[in-house]
Image (cartoon, rainbow, N blue to C red):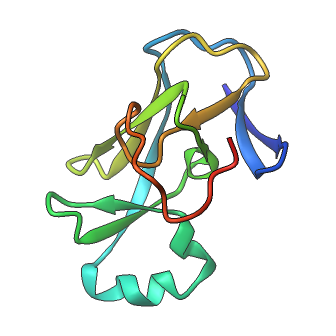
């Protein structure tokens, strides 16, 4: 359903390998939970840019073991993500129809409509 490819100006990204319908689950990927006391060490590595905030108080981190970890940010995303702590997964769901070959993007703030600045300059 999805593949990794080159995203112009953004490095790697995730692309639809076929048409994806609005509301369709794109991926349901497993995570490895990183305890709060290890996040400082995680931030000191390249993986510091790839984890999701985890737990009710967002004190833990989750490393996604799926292609969704390579989704690029957009303030006008075509997908959203849902955290599932009880299953230790993160789901990616299409917000609208996504064309075959189109890049799958999410809003890194979690809320698809958020315009909150990120921790890095965006390329939109």
Is 120 positioned to the left or the right of 108 in the image?
Answer: right
| Residue 114 against residue 50 in the figure, above or below | above
The one of 76 and 62 positioned closer to us in this rendering? 76
The location of residue 35, given as percent across then percent down, is: 28, 78
What residue lies at 71% left-to-right and 13% top-to-bottom?
99
Q: Position of residue 114 (x, y in %)?
A: 38, 38
Instruction: Report the number of numbered marks.
Output: 0
Query: Image check: 21 left or right of 84?
Result: right
Instruction: Check the image and name the residue furthest to the left.
Output: 56
In the picture, which quadrant includes the N terminus?
Answer: top right
47 is higher (above) or lower (below) than 7: below
State the residue at coordinates (43%, 51%): 30
Taking the spot 39% from the left edge, 44% from the top edge, the residue there is: 90
Q: Residue at x 53, y 88 (%)?
A: 44
Percent x, y of residue 41: 45, 90
x, y (%) of residue 83? Answer: 31, 45
* Quadrant including the C terminus: top right
Q: Nearer the viewer, residue 116 or 84?
A: 116
* 47 lies above or below 32: below
């Amino acid at each position: 359903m999805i593949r990794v490819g080159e995203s112009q100006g953004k490095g790697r990204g995730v692309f639809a390998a076929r048409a994806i319908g609005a509301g369709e689950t794109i991926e349901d990927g497993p995570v490895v939970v990183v305890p709060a006391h290890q996040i400082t060490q995680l931030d000191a590595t390249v993986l510091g840019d790839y984890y999701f905030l985890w737990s009710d108080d967002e004190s833990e981190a989750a490393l996604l073991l799926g292609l969704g970890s390579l989704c690029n940010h957009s303030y006008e995303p075509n997908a959203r993500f849902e955290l599932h702590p009880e299953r230790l997964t993160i789901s990616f769901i299409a917000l609208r129809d996504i064309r075959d070959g189109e890049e799958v993007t999410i809003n890194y703030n979690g809320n698809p409509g958020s315009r909150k600045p990120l921790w890095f300059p965006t390329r939109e």
